[in-house]
Image (cartoon, rainbow, N blue to C red):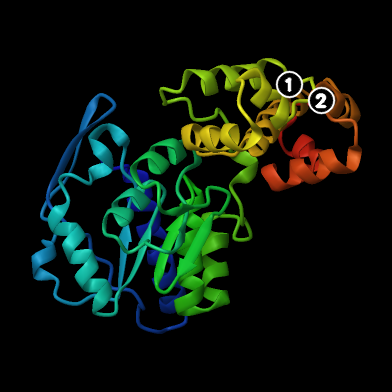
């Protein structure tokens, strides 16, 4: 199922870029076309449809392809998009650039064009993406990736930053700033890390590792080491780490850190504790170490996070 907001938001930005040129008495820069098949789907208590879409077979040459976001209810549109996937690959080989918005990265990944490249998508789709494309370099902290004419964006409104990025690349900073100001988009956002909620991948059958995941999550105030977890599983450190990474797609050290920082974020959001109290509550005693790990995972410092998200 298409997420219409991603499609129409991208169109709106490119239209504003055209408006920028027309305001200067110049011709519009972009010829925007919706290409694919006729669409009809439910939207809340109504029916949503787009008819008379230009068929991909009629488009022999284009400059840039924007892949919108899709829900996971229909496999992110991959199974029904064989013709589109082949067309995207051929257009890229013929010089077109390709950009995916939010979960559109799944369809882009299915083309094979992301092999050997970093990519991003909505952080909520990370588990599904890693399961479907385990060999690809997913970086959910990034809002934008740019590799050899292949672009991907983070989730939801982060996709708008990718479209602004393309406008700046094709039309310059002033055009991008115009679009940013008219549509009130923060053009300088560069990470979706502050918005990520870490739950940990639990869609696996390794009961011993699952038990250790629960142990970490239920003992955030304790100092937890990989050796301690390995001992609890009666494994050596190397074997435990390898098995943990295979099951969760995350190393034990990173998992411990992300669980603790997620708990710290919730405490900071409530606004009841100061930074040091939050630090102690999640098992850290070194202010510098806590701040460093927090910023690495959340993209901003604990103080900045508290200012941004605390209800107080």
Residue under pointer 2: 283
Q: CA distance from mark 1 to mark 2?
A: 6 Å
Secondary structure found at label 2: loop
Q: Is residue 58 above or below residue 282?
A: below
Left or right: residue 35 compared with residue 161: left
Dot 1 or dot 2, earlier in sequence: 1
Which residue is more in the foreground, 174 or 73?
73
* Residue 35 seen: no
Residue at the (36%, 47%) spot, across then down? 133
Residue 31 in the image: state x and y as whole percent.
28, 73
Q: Quadrant of residue 304?
A: top right
Left or right: residue 220 compared with residue 288: left
For residue 240, the mark is none
Residue at the (32%, 64%) spot, across then down? 113
Which of the image's four quarters has the C terminus?
Answer: top right
Residue at the (45%, 78%) spot, across then down? 170
Q: Quadrant of residue 149?
A: bottom left
Which residue is more in the foreground, 46 or 121?
121
Residue under pointer 1: 220
| Contact check, label 1 and label 2, Cβ < 8 Å | yes
């Amino acid at each position: 199922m298409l997420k219409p907001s991603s499609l129409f938001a991208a169109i709106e930005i490119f239209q504003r870029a055209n408006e920028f040129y027309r305001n200067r008495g110049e011709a519009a820069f972009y010829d925007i076309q919706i290409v694919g098949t006729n669409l009809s789907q439910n939207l809340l208590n109504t029916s949503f449809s787009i008819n008379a879409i230009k068929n991909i077979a009629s488009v022999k040459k284009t400059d840039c392809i924007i892949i919108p976001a899709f829900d996971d209810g229909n496999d992110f549109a991959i199974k029904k998009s064989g013709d589109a996937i082949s067309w995207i690959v051929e257009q890229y080989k013929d010089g077109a650039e390709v950009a995916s918005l939010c979960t559109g990265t799944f369809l882009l990944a299915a083309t094979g064009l992301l092999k050997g490249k970093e990519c991003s998508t909505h952080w909520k789709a990370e588990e599904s993406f890693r399961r479907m494309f385990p060999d690809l370099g997913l970086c959910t902290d990034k809002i934008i990736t740019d590799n050899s004419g292949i672009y991907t964006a983070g989730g939801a409104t982060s996709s708008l930053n990718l479209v602004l990025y393309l406008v700046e690349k094709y039309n310059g900073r002033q055009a991008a700033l115009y679009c940013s100001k008219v549509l009130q988009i923060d053009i300088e956002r560069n990470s979706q890390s502050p918005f990520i909620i870490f739950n940990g991948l639990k869609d696996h059958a390794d009961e011993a590792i699952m038990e250790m995941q629960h142990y970490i999550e239920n003992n955030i105030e304790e100092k937890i080491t990989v050796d301690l977890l390995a001992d609890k599983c009666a494994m050596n450190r190397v074997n435990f780490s390898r098995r943990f990474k295979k099951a969760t797609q995350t190393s034990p050290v990173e998992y411990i850190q992300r669980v603790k920082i997620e708990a710290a974020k919730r405490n900071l959001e409530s606004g009841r504790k100061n930074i040091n109290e939050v630090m102690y509550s999640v098992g850290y005693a070194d202010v510098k170490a806590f701040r460093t790990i927090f910023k690495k995972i959340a993209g901003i410092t604990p103080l900045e996070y508290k200012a941004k998200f605390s209800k107080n």
